[in-house]
Image (tube, grey):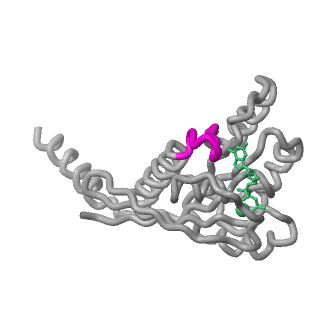
Amino acid sequence: MTEKKFKIVLIGPPYSGKTSIAQCYINQKFEYTIPTTSAAYFTKQLKINETTYTFNLWDTAGQEKFRSVASMYYRNANVFIIVVDPHDVQSYSQIDDWFSLINKYCDFGAYQCILAINKMDIEISNSTYDLFKDKAQQKKCQLIMCSAKANKGIEELFYEALQIAVNHDAKNASLHSPNVQYIDKEIQLKKDKQCC
Ligand SMILES: Nc1nc2c(ncn2[C@@H]2O[C@H](COP(=O)(O)OP(=O)(O)OP(=O)(O)O)[C@@H](O)[C@H]2O)c(=O)[nH]1
Ligand SMILES: [Mg+2]
């Protein structure tokens, strides 16, 4: 049995539903929330085949006045889930600022991002959806629609986070592992050619 740990950080504007998403995923409940003042920590384990995946999940404050404290929890994150409320006009215009904030605290290429559109239990127009879809494409990140209230898309959101963390981890591992085997193989092939 192998174990892999990933740090997942929920970020985004105040009132977008970060805490509700975390509670829905961890406790399967949609409960009353109060604004987060710095960050809350949750953990969850998933066993898939012979591997145990541990999520270290950080739910951070969206309010401006808590942001400098909240951003201390960004370091070494594997995946950022940027949660937005499509019914809040400011949510869309602030997406670039959230990406800039991540870049301030984390090395480019060290993390992956998902754009999560929450509160999908309340209908949105096609043009609003297209705006978010284009933004996700521009930022090269996954777009996931969900509703903490209706418990829709939440499992899928974290499963996607796990998948991109696993893929990114595997890519990094292969980049950092010595390539001796391949070099040996190439030499062997060249030798074989010379022989024939
Ligand atoms: N309709 C609807 N309301 C939601 C949903 N998720 C959260 N809410 C409501 O949105 C409000 C804010 O939710 P929170 O989870 O506290 O938001 P937050 O992003 O953690 O806010 P901060 O901690 O201040 O950054 C609450 O009134 C929730 O009940 C959802 O999926 N649908
Ligand atoms: Mg919160």
Image location of residue 77, percent across then percent down: 58, 65
- Is 172 positioned to the left or the right of 151 in the image? left
Image location of residue 73, percent across then percent down: 66, 72
- Is 100 positioned to the left or the right of 121 in the image? right
Q: Is residue 188 magenta?
A: no
Q: Is residue 89 above or below residue 77?
A: above
Quadrant in which residue 189 is drawn: top left
Judged from this view, the residue extending furthest toward the front is 32
Image location of residue 98, percent across then percent down: 77, 56
Q: Is residue 152 magenta?
A: yes
Which residue corresponds to the image point at 75% horizontal and 55% vertical from the top-left?
12
- Is 23 positioned to the left or the right of 88 in the image? left
Which residue corresponds to the image point at 74% horizontal and 47% vertical from the top-left?
84
State the count of labels: 0
Which residue corresponds to the image point at 11% horizontal and 43% vertical from the top-left?
195
Q: Which residues are magenta?
A: 144-154
Q: Is residue 166 above or below residue 157?
A: below
- State which quarter of the image contains the C terminus: top left
Which residue corresponds to the image point at 29% horizontal and 55% vertical from the top-left?
183
Q: From the viewer's side, name the closer residue of 43 and 27.
A: 27
Q: Main secondary structure of the magenta part?
A: loop
Q: From the viewer's side, name the closer residue of 113 and 109.
A: 113
Quadrant in which residue 3 is drawn: bottom left
Image location of residue 187, percent across then percent down: 23, 52
